[in-house]
Amino acid sequence: MESPVSNTILQSNQLFPHPNSLQILQSNQLFPHPNSLQILRETVKILMQNPTTFIAISILLISPVSAIHLSNLLVDQSIVKTTTKTLLLVLKSSGLPSIPFVQQSCQKLAEIAISSIASFPFYCTLLLISKAAVVYSVECTYSRKKFVSSKFYVILKTIWRRIVSTYILICALIVGCLALFMILLICVTRLLFVIGFSRDSIGCIVVIIGLVFMLFLAHTLIVCDLSMVISVWEDVSGTQALVRSRVLIRGQTRVGLTIFVGSTVGMAIVKGLFEHRVKSLSYGDGYSRVWERPVLVLVYSFVVLIDFMMSAVFFFSCKSYSLEAVECGM
């Protein structure tokens, strides 16, 4: 049960919606139809206005999670191989041909699943705290306030339960989407195999279904990501945050998709460099390139920070767009 003192401090810090931040956002010309480039520019502008706070968040909170994620310290590769073989056997028994796309997809899915399970405690603590800290810092920048650690700690204690519940629901939703996709894929491939389609034709259809699902999953992840910002900013959580996010993103889906693709590509590039330079290459005793590991971890953490900041700015732009639409309709 939240104490009146915590509620008073929370309201005094104006973490919930108030006109000042939205008016400042509109004055920065992100309204009425912001695009991804404008949101990126606004993000860079906010970063330049308060670099110390955001860099501290990146180093102290995001970097440890990035180091674990990139190096796969907690992932047992034997479990990944076993999971990959199991997925391939299940798909092969349904009539799906073992084409390279299917093999790579199964291996990637197994790696992501095992890594996510192993790193879940860090995702559910450090990463959520960093997400809340970024949203709060962006709001402080808009309302021209200083980031105070003690005030953020009080706010975090108040909102912690709802952001964790929202995150757990998001994880369950993503797992459900993946499970539903696997079931649908098996059913479709078995049906096509019974009808008499060739393995090559089934493979092409599977690739098309996979691409359509990736688009659907990307849209779902955008809604989920925005719902996390909403659970920090507004007094809603779980299903209410997801519904609120779905309503708020209407008319801005393409912008959100562009932001998501840009962030995903950036993280994939840095992760690919880490895989190639740190894990694959070997130079003598290895000490000559020991500096590349922390540098790439910091770069990856910075990309994640920019992604968090853009999500917060995107929320503010959607919020201002929504409020203006309501005012115009009145």
Image: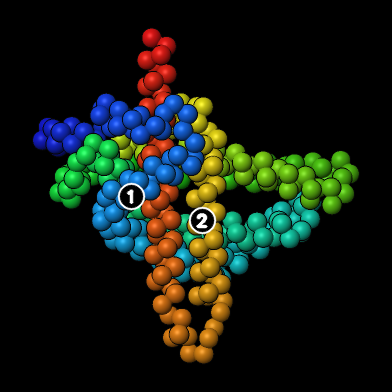
Question: What amino acid is labelled 1 in the image?
Answer: Leu
Write down the residue under mark 1: 47
Residue found 39% across the figure and 71% down from its top: 294
Residue 100: give its label. none
Quarter occupied by the C terminus: top left
Category of crowding for the residue at label 1, using alpha-carbon neighbours closer than 10 angstroms: few (below 14), some (14–19), many (at least 20): many
Residue at the far left: name it.
Answer: 5
How many discs appear? 2
The residue lying at 39 percent from left, 32 percent from top is 29
> Which amino acid type corresponds to the residue marked 2 in the rendered image?
Gly
The residue lying furthest to the bottom in this view is 284
Give the x, y percent position of residue 107: 62, 61
Mark 2: give few (<14), some (14-19) or many (20+) Cα within 10 Å: some
The x and y percentages for residue 14 are 21, 33
Which type of secondary structure does the marked residue at label 1 adopt?
A: helix
- Location of mark 2 (residue): 266
Give the residue drawn at x 39%, y 16%.
326
The one nearer the camera, 28 or 322, is 28
Q: On the rendered structure, is 251 left or right of 301?
A: right
Residue 168 in view in this figure: no
Sequence-wise, the earlier of marks 1 and 2 is 1
